[in-house]
Amino acid sequence: MQVRQIGPGFAAEAIGVDLSEGFDEAIGRDIAAAVSAHGVLVIRNARPLSDARHLELSRPLGPIEGGSLFKVVGRDRSRLSLPGIVDVSNLDADGNILAEDARLRAFRKGDRLWHTDMSFHDNRATLSLLSAHEVPPRGGQTWFADMRLAWEALPAERARQIAGLVAEHSIWHSRQMAGFPEPTAEELASRPPVRHPLVHVHAPSGRQALYLASHASHIVGWPIEEGRALLR
């Protein structure tokens, strides 16, 4: 496997590997090292990965989040059968497009906000694997930012200001920003807010990084609106 940088200071493409044909532990280690170095790694496969192959690829990279992430009222079963595959589509459990007024559709609109995957979870995610099965002819791009570069680009005064601050993260905060109604008590209890440092060390690379995005609600110990203004 060869790695070619394709982005402005981060993001790379893997050359000479097709995961739809299978892989071994050595390739898994190479992928993990490339992601650590470049933040984002693009792998172009001849055909989409099956769900089983997707999970097979994930296992050498670390423990897989397999539990229920949150409860959305009205969603009683999943469209996907394998735990560890997260369904972020606009389809219901039977594969039909969600009704315009469906609560789950309103919830999913929050996915369009820029976010850090799983920051609303106490056990933060190390990696996310996205597999494209059908690509629209135009639009629908997924954009990425390297928060290590964002931290390194901050003016020294701002870096000193935020070092040591803690932000509270909530999936319900980002959902409501996108128009989701007030969450129910059951929904709130299924995924209560958590707190994470605003600046942390990305352990594999040893570089500091900002840790924020739409799930970050406010700064702990600050007036709510003042903290949100800082996050914006």
Image: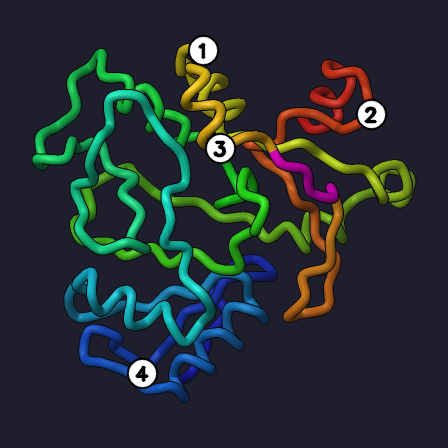
Mark 3 or 4, which is nearer the eye? Answer: 3
- Say above or below: 86 vs 111: below
Tell me the residue that label 1 is attached to.
182
Tell me the residue that label 3 is attached to.
191
Is residue 200 magenta-colored?
no
230 or 2: nearer the viewer: 230
Which colouring convention does the figure follow? rainbow
Q: Label 3 neighbourhood size at 10 Å, few (<14), some (14-19), many (20+)? A: some
Residue appearing at x 37%, y 58% in the figure = 129
What's under tag 3, amino acid-wise? Arg
Distance of mark 4 from mark 1, alpha carbons?
48 Å
What's under tag 4, amino acid-wise? Gly
Distance of mark 4 from mark 2, alpha carbons?
50 Å
Question: Does residue 53 appear left or right of residue 162 in this picture?
Answer: left
SS assignment at label 4: loop
Residue appearing at x 8%, y 30% in the figure = 96
What's under tag 2, amino acid-wise? Gly
What's under tag 1, amino acid-wise? Glu
Q: Which mark is residue 16?
A: 4
- Residues at circles 3 and 1 in contact by the CB criterion of under 8 Å: no
SS assignment at label 2: loop
Q: Earlier in the sequence, mark 2 or mark 3?
A: 3
Residue 123 % position (x, y): 56, 51
Q: Label 1 neighbourhood size at 10 Å, few (<14), some (14-19), many (20+)? A: few
Q: Which residues are magenta?
A: 194-198
Tell me the residue that label 2 is attached to.
221
Distance of mark 2 from mark 1, alpha carbons?
24 Å
Q: Label 2 neighbourhood size at 10 Å, few (<14), some (14-19), many (20+)? A: few
Residue 181 % position (x, y): 40, 11
Q: Earlier in the sequence, mark 4 or mark 2?
A: 4
SS assignment at label 3: loop
Give residue 69's quadrant in the image: top left
